[in-house]
């Protein structure tokens, strides 16, 4: 099977698993991954009768970025995408330029959807998944991070997680288009670039190949396990929740992996942000190692406390979602 046919098949199979909106959006950077994805989406759309729309984000981080964005929009129009628009964003915020650009990009993509509803396809490949798993492993981020990116995490869709970067590049060759080469993708200041250009090639050499697919398979296996545990945790959460509090007797008999998922959901839903593993384990100790100790201070000047067999949050009134 040709690379172009493989990309088209991956998109068709992914779209068969989701409820299709009337319009499918594709995030386009101008690189090989997003250009191949856009063409494949347009190809499937002609056979399944849905509209296609390309969203090109101009981060304004490089000289001539507006021209690059305009050219990307023109290319995918020629490849069959019905409409293509460029959205300029301002990259500001903490976490370094990579994180700030990502935050700005995802915000703009979400805002482009009508009422936040719909589907935006992203060009993440098997190689991106492998890099994500390595990053999570190196940071000790736990199984949720090692599980990598989900194929469908509404409104985001990632049809190409089984397609390699080489395949998207070859697909563009077959289409007769020259994708944009982002100079940031060769800049060793960025962690992902060094993973891509130094770490993964070394691992491929030492382990005799197949590392990226193996990491992607590991992510898929962990994702299945994580989703199963999340399902169990949701049931426990429903039993333990007493208004804005949690019943510690319900939590105490559960395995740590389930209990901490319940606590994580409770804290996030209660407005706690920048929650770390250390925070979560300290709150868990109020259940699993209760000795009458004091509360746990959390980001946002909130305090998790235990009293009369219940966990509660004290401090500024938490912003609660869904209540």
Image: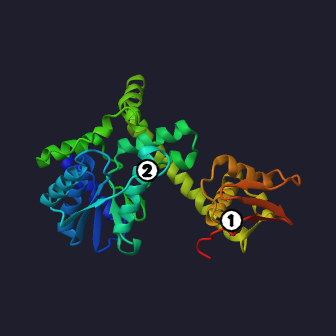
Is 212 displayed left or right of 319 in the figure?
left
**Residue 187 visible from this viewpoint:** yes
Which residue is outermost to the top? Answer: 206
Q: Is residue 24 above or below residue 90?
A: below
Q: Earlier in the sequence, mark 2 or mark 1?
A: 2
Residue 153 falls in which quadrant of the image? Answer: bottom left
Which residue is the extreme one toward the right?
Answer: 292
* Residue 318: image location, x then y, percent: 67, 68
Residue 161, position in %: x, y? 36, 49
Is the residue under label 1 in contact with that under label 2 (CB below 8 Å)?
Answer: no
Which mark identifies residue 146? none
**Secondary structure type for disc 2:** helix
54 over 290 or under it: above or below = below
Residue annotated with mark 2: 100
Question: Closer to the camera, 97 or 313?
Answer: 97
Q: CA distance from mark 2 to mark 1?
A: 36 Å
Q: Residue at x 79, y 60 (%)?
A: 305
| Picture residue at 40% right of the left edge, 65% below the top | 155
Q: Position of residue 40 (x, y in %)?
A: 22, 57
Specify whether 66 is left or right of 92.
Answer: left
Q: Who is closer to the viewer here, 290 or 162?
A: 290
In screen coordinates, is 177 left or right of 58? Answer: left
Under circle 1, the secondary element is: helix
Quarter of image, res 76: bottom left
Q: Which residue is mark 1?
A: 236
**5 over 238 or under it: above or below:** above
Q: Pointer 1: residues within 10 angstroms few (<14), some, or many (20+)?
A: some
Is residue 151 visible to us here?
no
Residue depicted at x 56% and y 46%: 143
**Mark 2, mark 1: which one is toward the viewer?**
2
The C terminus sits in image quarter: bottom right
Mark 2 surroundings: few (<14), some (14-19) or many (≥20) residues within 10 A: some
């Amino acid at each position: 099977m040709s690379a172009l046919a493989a990309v088209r098949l991956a998109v068709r199979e992914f779209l068969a698993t989701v409820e299709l909106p009337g319009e499918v959006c594709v995030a386009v950077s101008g690189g090989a991954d997003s250009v191949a994805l856009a063409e494949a989406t347009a190809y499937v759309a002609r056979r399944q009768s849905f509209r296609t729309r390309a969203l090109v984000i101009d981060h304004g981080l490089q000289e001539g970025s507006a021209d690059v964005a305009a050219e990307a929009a023109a290319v995918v129009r020629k490849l069959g995408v019905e409409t293509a628009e460029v959205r300029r964003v301002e990259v500001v915020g903490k976490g370094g330029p990579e994180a700030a650009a990502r935050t700005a990009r995802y915000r703009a993509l979400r805002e482009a959807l009508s009422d936040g509803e719909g589907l935006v396809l992203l060009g993440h490949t098997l190689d991106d998944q492998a890099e994500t798993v390595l990053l999570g492993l190196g940071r000790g981020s736990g199984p949720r991070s090692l599980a990598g990116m989900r194929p469908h995490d509404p409104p985001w869709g990632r049809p190409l997680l089984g397609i390699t970067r080489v395949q998207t590049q070859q697909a563009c060759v077959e289409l007769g288009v020259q994708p944009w080469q982002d100079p940031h993708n060769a800049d060793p200041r960025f962690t992902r670039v060094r993973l891509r250009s130094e770490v993964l090639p070394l691992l491929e050499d030492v382990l005799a190949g197949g590392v990226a697919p193996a990491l992607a398979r590991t992510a898929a296996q962990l994702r299945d396990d994580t989703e199963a545990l999340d399902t169990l945790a949701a049931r426990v959460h429903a039993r333990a929740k007493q208004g804005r509090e949690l019943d510690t007797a319900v939590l105490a008999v559960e395995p740590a992996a389930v209990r901490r998922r319940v606590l994580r959901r409770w804290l996030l839903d209660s407005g706690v942000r920048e929650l770390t593993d250390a925070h979560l384990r300290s709150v868990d100790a109020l259940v699993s190692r209760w000795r009458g100790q004091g509360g746990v201070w959390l980001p946002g000047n909130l305090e998790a406390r235990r009293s009369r067999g219940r966990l509660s949050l004290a401090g500024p009134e938490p912003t609660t979602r869904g209540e």
